[in-house]
Image (cartoon, helix red, strand yellow):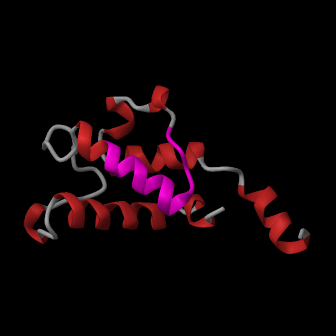
Amino acid sequence: MNLAASNPTVVTDDLLAYVRKEFLDNDDSADLTATSPLLEWGILNSMTTVRLVAHVKSEFGVAIPPQRMSAGNFRDIESIVQLVQELAPATSGAQAVEQGGE
């Protein structure tokens, strides 16, 4: 499991960088922040959302189920980070395995 999913700053920074690189062609002039309205600005659509969800699963090991795929959960980076935090496996069990389990 990727423990980075439990750190909201890491997830925010990663998602901002991913969106800039993959959807904005590394355009730093886009004024993208964690609260930028991704849907209103047309950054996220059905295809880009699928790519972003795949990135979250690949990077953080967090699968976003179809029932959580709503406009409210993808309104901005902050909303997505909150969703990742909610869906991330509990880190206490993973830490226990890493510390003493085989």
Which image quarter holds the N terminus?
bottom right
The magenta stretch spans residue 92: no
Instruction: Reply above or below: 42 against 27.
Output: above
- What is the total number of numbered labels drawn onto the structure image? 0
Instruction: Reply above or below: 21 against 39.
Output: below
The magenta segment is: 50-64
Q: Is residue 27 left or right of residue 100?
A: left
- Residues 100 and 12: in front is 100
Q: Is residue 83 left or right of residue 86?
A: left
Q: Where's residue 46, x and y in %?
A: 25, 36
Residue drawn at 61 percent across, 49 percent down: 88
Report which quarter residue 92 is drawn in.
Answer: bottom right
Q: Where's residue 47, x and y in %?
A: 25, 42
Residue drawn at 77 percent across, 61 percent down: 94
Regarding residue 8, the answer to whether it shows in the image is: no
Extreme residue in the left direction: 29
Residue drawn at 81 percent across, 71 percent down: 98
Extreme residue in the top direction: 67
Regarding residue 80, the answer to whether it shows in the image is: yes
Q: Is residue 86 left or right of residue 53?
A: right
Q: Is residue 76 left or right of residue 101?
A: left
Instruction: Reply above or below: 69 against 53.
Output: above
Which image quarter holds the C terminus?
bottom right
